[in-house]
Amino acid sequence: MAVDVLIGLQWGDEGKGKVVDYLAGRYDIICRFQGGPNAGHTIYTVKGKFVLHTIPSGIFRSNTQNVIGNGVVIDPITLKKEILGLKEMGVDATANLLVSKKAHLILPSHRYLDVASEISKGKKKIGSTLRGIGPTYMDKTGRNGLRFGDINSAEFKKKYQELKNKHLQLGEMYGDVPFEWNDEEWFESIEFLKSLETVSCEYYLNKALKAGKTILAEGAQGVMLDIDFGTYPYVTSSNTITAGICTGLGVAPTQIGEVIGISKAYCTRVGGGPFPTELFDDNGKKLQDLGHEFGATTGRPRRCGWLDLVQLKYSVMINGVTQIALTKSDIMDHFEEITIADEYEVNGYKTQELPFDLCDENYKVSLKSFKGWNTDLSAIKKEGKALPQEFETYVAFLESSLEVSIPMISIGPGRDELILRQTS
Ligand code: GDP
Ligand code: IMO
Ligand code: MG
């Protein structure tokens, strides 16, 4: 058996949660391998909408085990709230949730440093979700961090205070930082989380693979927010790509199976940083309105733009994508013309490769338009009719350019609002 992977191919919010929730019925185990509560994965259940930040999106299936891997950073307050929120919906998350002892903890003082760092950057701020993600990964690589497996240690409070003191000293460099401390709530949440089952996820998952269990690794954020390959420095602080699974879960590269890439039929980005196909016109506003493009974690409006084929090719290459799910295709039902970027011009030369630094604006994108299908794809599905020719032409072009098949077309936020296409 192998670990299948599901990752966002753009700047996050591609609809990963929705697709994982749909696919979860096929898997025994769903794992998060990186990121933390900067993620917001929206799922519509019969009981309503729920946004997951730390818990994998398999939690709504009673037969699925969910694992928070070692590569994830955990804010105890958010995780407790998530578990209680699920309980209110009648889902006992604690029954099928395992947490890696090696996952690092986000302290209130990590969030404090995040706020301080963003303020100090002024106009050049990253647009972080301010969840303490960057400072926590800095402490992890700086070999200072506290891990979930430490919470029962007699030294825990002492280690916490030492790390907090270090952060406060660092903070002095920034001057006054507006911040509400909530250490008490943090420790209360830690107490609450002590009842969760912990694992060494590298042993747990490798044994599960040997026993023939099916596993899906659920990415957070997207390729263009990857710390190495994203639009640096406007990125998050983890490896969001397929390679992150090996370090974030403890499985070998030879154990990777299918790589399912999730792409919207257009692009969005929340926060700062370059966005080559961003639209500032009526079409951008239309995408934002029809797509309800507001962040699931911070509620900030998402910037919108056309699909970027050069960027997608890059994502497919880095991740070894074997199939794509095209989400929010229903939003394109309302466009007479559908536009995509199919080439870049860098310093006067046409290219299919992304330039080194997308922040350096020495490039242009060339656009290509397709006739829109102007048809309600949900009605097509309901009536069991064939997909419109214009739609097939558009998807066939994407498939041949990307050299990857697109068997899943998502046409709404609900679990079954999906069209499955026959692909060769
Ligand atoms: P994630 O972070 O990748 O899981 O995505 P988010 O949950 O942050 O954002 C995706 C948004 O689009 C959510 O509100 C989903 O409910 C919604 N969504 C997902 N797929 C579709 C789709 O195919 N069509 C429409 N209209 N909405 C979708
Ligand atoms: P999901 O999993 C969209 C963005 C932030 C900011 C940058 C760095 O829901 O797709 P950070 O908080 O990590 O320091 O922020 O990354 N960002 C996301 N954008 N979806 C996400 O997650 C994101 N997680 C972080 O807006 O620009
Ligand atoms: Mg999201």
Image (cartoon, rainbow, N blue to C red):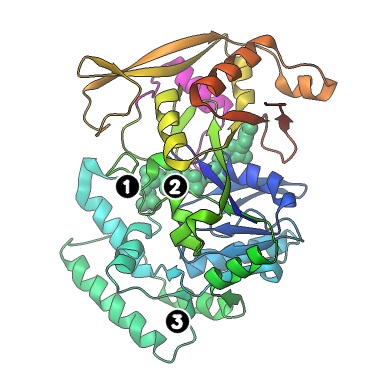
Q: Nearer the viewer, residue 238 or 245?
A: 245
Quadrant the N terminus occupies: bottom right
Residue type marked 2: Ile
Mark 2 or mark 1, which has the lower sequence index?
A: 1
Question: Do the residues bearing badges 3 and 1 touch, measured as CB atoms within 8 Å?
Answer: no
Circle 1 — which element? loop
Q: Is residue 401 above or below residue 156?
A: above
- Residue 244 is situated, as x and y percent measured from the top left of the image, at 44, 54
How packed mark 3 is, by other alpha carbons closer than 10 Å (few <14, some 14-19, many 20 or more), is some
The secondary element bearing badge 2 is classed as loop
Q: Closer to the observer: label 3 or label 2?
A: 2
x, y percent for residue 34: 46, 57
Where, quadrant-wise, is the C terminus in this rendering? top right
Q: Quadrant of residue 393?
A: top right
Indicate whether 102 appears above or below 327: below
Indicate whether residue 289 is drawn in magenta: yes
Nearer to the camera, 253 or 191 = 253
Residue 184 left/right relative to 113 = right
The amino acid pointed to by label 3 is: Asp
Query: Taking the image as four quarters, which one is ligand 1 found in?
Result: top right
Give me the disc on residue 216.
none
Instruction: Give above or below for 386 relative to 318.
Output: above
| Pointer 3 or 2: first along the chain | 3
Q: Are marks 3 and 2 in contact (CB under 8 Å)?
A: no
**Mark 2 in CB contact with mark 1 (< 8 angstroms):** yes
Residue that appears at 54% across and 81% down: 191
Q: Is residue 257 left or right of residue 126?
A: right
Q: What residue did someone put label 3 on?
A: 150
Point out the stretch of residues depicted in magenta: 276-296
- Residue to which mark 1 is pinned: 228
